[in-house]
C-alpha cells in the first residue's frame, strides 16, 4: 500500500512540474482520437494512412485557423468600441463599491470596537508581481508547446497507429492481450464519443445563443454567442459564466433589469437543454461518471494545471474509470467513479 502511495505521489509531482509536456501529450492524444475516424474513412477509399493522416492534420489546422481568424476579426471590432463599455463598467463598479462601503460602515456601527492598535501586516508587492510574471511565462510556455508540437504529434500518432497498437500489445503477456485490447477499444470509443459529442453540443448551444442575441439586437451577436456557448458547458459554473459576455455587451444597450434577467433566463434554458438532453444522448452513453467524481476531478486537475486542467479533467477521469473497469482488483474504484 505504501509503495502505491509513493508511486502516486511521484506521478502527481511529475505531472505538476512537467505540466507543459503532459498537457501537450494529452491534448495531442485527444485530437488524434478526434481525427482518426476521418483517416479510417480515407483508408476505405485506398488512401495511404500516412497521406490520410496528413490530410486530417491539415484540415484540423485549417479549421482552427479559420475559427481564429473569424474570432480575431470580431474581437478587433469589439476592441475599437471598448471605451464605451469601459465607461459603463466603471460606473457600475463604482456603484457596487459604494454600496459595499455603506454596508461596511453600518457593520462597523453594530460591531464591537477593537481594543488596542491593529497589527500592521506588510505585503511584499515585488514578490506577488514576480509570481504573477512567472505564472504568465509558464502559461506562454505551455501555449507555445501546444502550438508548435501538437500538429506533429497528432500526425505521428495517426500515421503510426497500427505500429503503436502492436507495440503496446507486446508489453503484456499473451494471456492478457485480449483483455488489454478490449480495454483500449473501450477507451478509444469513450474518448471519441466524449470529444465529438461535446463538440456537437458546444456548436448547437453557440448557434442557438448567436440566433437569440441576433433576434434581441445585441451587439456582436456572433462573437458573444460563440464565447457564451463555449462557457455554457463548463461544469457547474458554466451557466453563470455564460451570462457574463452578453450582460457586459448589453450594458450600453439595455437600461431595464428585466432585459438582463431575460438574457440570463434564456441562457439558463439552453444550459438545461444541453446538460439534461444533449449531453446524455451524445456523450453519456460512453462516459459514466458520478457528480462527486467529476467535482473532485475538476478541483484536482484545476489545481494541477489551471484552465487546461478543467478541460482535461473529465476525459482523464473517464479513461481511468474504463481502465479500472477492465483490470482485476480495480473494479471497486471504477464503480466508485461511476457512482
Image (tube, helix red, strand yellow):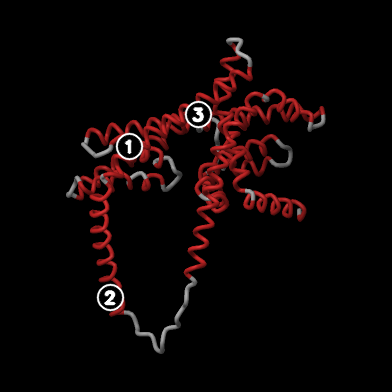
Q: Quadrant of residue 315?
A: top right
Asked whether 277 or 180 is in front, the reply is 180
Badge nearest the viewer, 2 or 1: 1
Residue position for label 2: 105
Closest to the observer, 250 or 195: 250
The residue wearing badge 1 is: 74
Q: Is residue 11 left or right of residue 98?
A: right
Residue 137 image point, x, y percent: 53, 52
At 43% across and 47% down in the image, what residue appears?
A: 236
Q: How far, Cα to Cα, is label 2 from label 3?
A: 56 Å
Q: Quadrant of the C terminus?
A: top right
Image marks 1 and 3: residues in contact by CB distance under 8 Å? no
Q: Nearer the viewer, mark 2 or mark 3?
A: 3
- Answer few, some or many: residues within 10 Å of disc 2's Cα (few below 14, many 20 plus, some between 14 and 19): few
Quick one: label 1 or label 3, which is nearer the N terminus? 3
**Residue depicted at x 67% and y 37%:** 323
Q: Quick one: 24 or 309, which is closer to the camera?
A: 24
Instruction: Name the element at disc 1.
Output: helix
**Image: 121 above or below 278:** below
Left or right of 312? Residue 215 is left
Q: Which mark is residue 223?
A: none
Amino acid at each position: 500500500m505504501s509503495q502505491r502511495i509513493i508511486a502516486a505521489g511521484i506521478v502527481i509531482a511529475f505531472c505538476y512540474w512537467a505540466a507543459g509536456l503532459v498537457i501537450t501529450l494529452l491534448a495531442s492524444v485527444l485530437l488524434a482520437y478526434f481525427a482518426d475516424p476521418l483517416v479510417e474513412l480515407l483508408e476505405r477509399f485506398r488512401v495511404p494512412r500516412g497521406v490520410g493522416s496528413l490530410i486530417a492534420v491539415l484540415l484540423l489546422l485549417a479549421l482552427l485557423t479559420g475559427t481564429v481568424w473569424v474570432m480575431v476579426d470580431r474581437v478587433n471590432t469589439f476592441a475599437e468600441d471598448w471605451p464605451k463599455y469601459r465607461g459603463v463598467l466603471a460606473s457600475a463598479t463604482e456603484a457596487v463599491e459604494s454600496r459595499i462601503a455603506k454596508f461596511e460602515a453600518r457593520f462597523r456601527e453594530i460591531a464591537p470596537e477593537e481594543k488596542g492598535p491593529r497589527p500592521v501586516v506588510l505585503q511584499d508587492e515585488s514578490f506577488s508581481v514576480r509570481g504573477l510574471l512567472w505564472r504568465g511565462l509558464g502559461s506562454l510556455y505551455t501555449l507555445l508547446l501546444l502550438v508548435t508540437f501538437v500538429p506533429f504529434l497528432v500526425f505521428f500518432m495517426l500515421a503510426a497507429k497500427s505500429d503503436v497498437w502492436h507495440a503496446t500489445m507486446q508489453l503484456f503477456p499473451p494471456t492478457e492481450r485480449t483483455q488489454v485490447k478490449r480495454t483500449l477499444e473501450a477507451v478509444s470509443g469513450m474518448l471519441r464519443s466524449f470529444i465529438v459529442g461535446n463538440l456537437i453540443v458546444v456548436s448547437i448551444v453557440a448557434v442557438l445563443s448567436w440566433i437569440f442575441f441576433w433576434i434581441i439586437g445585441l451587439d456582436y451577436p456572433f462573437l458573444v454567442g460563440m464565447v457564451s456557448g463555449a462557457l455554457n458547458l463548463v461544469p457547474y459554473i458554466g451557466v453563470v459564466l455564460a451570462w457574463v459576455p452578453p450582460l457586459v455587451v448589453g450594458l450600453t444597450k439595455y437600461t431595464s433589469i428585466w432585459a438582463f434577467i431575460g438574457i440570463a433566463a434564456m441562457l439558463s434554458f439552453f444550459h438545461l437543454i444541453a446538460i439534461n438532453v444533449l449531453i446524455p444522448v451524445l456523450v453519456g452513453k460512453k462516459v459514466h461518471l458520478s457528480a462527486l467524481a467529476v467535482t473532485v476531478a475538476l478541483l484536482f486537475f484545476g489545481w494541477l494545471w489551471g484552465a487546461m486542467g478543467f478541460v482535461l479533467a473529465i476525459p482523464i477521469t473517464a479513461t481511468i474509470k474504463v481502465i479500472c473497469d477492465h483490470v482485476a482488483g480495480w473494479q471497486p474504484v471504477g464503480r466508485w467513479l461511476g457512482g
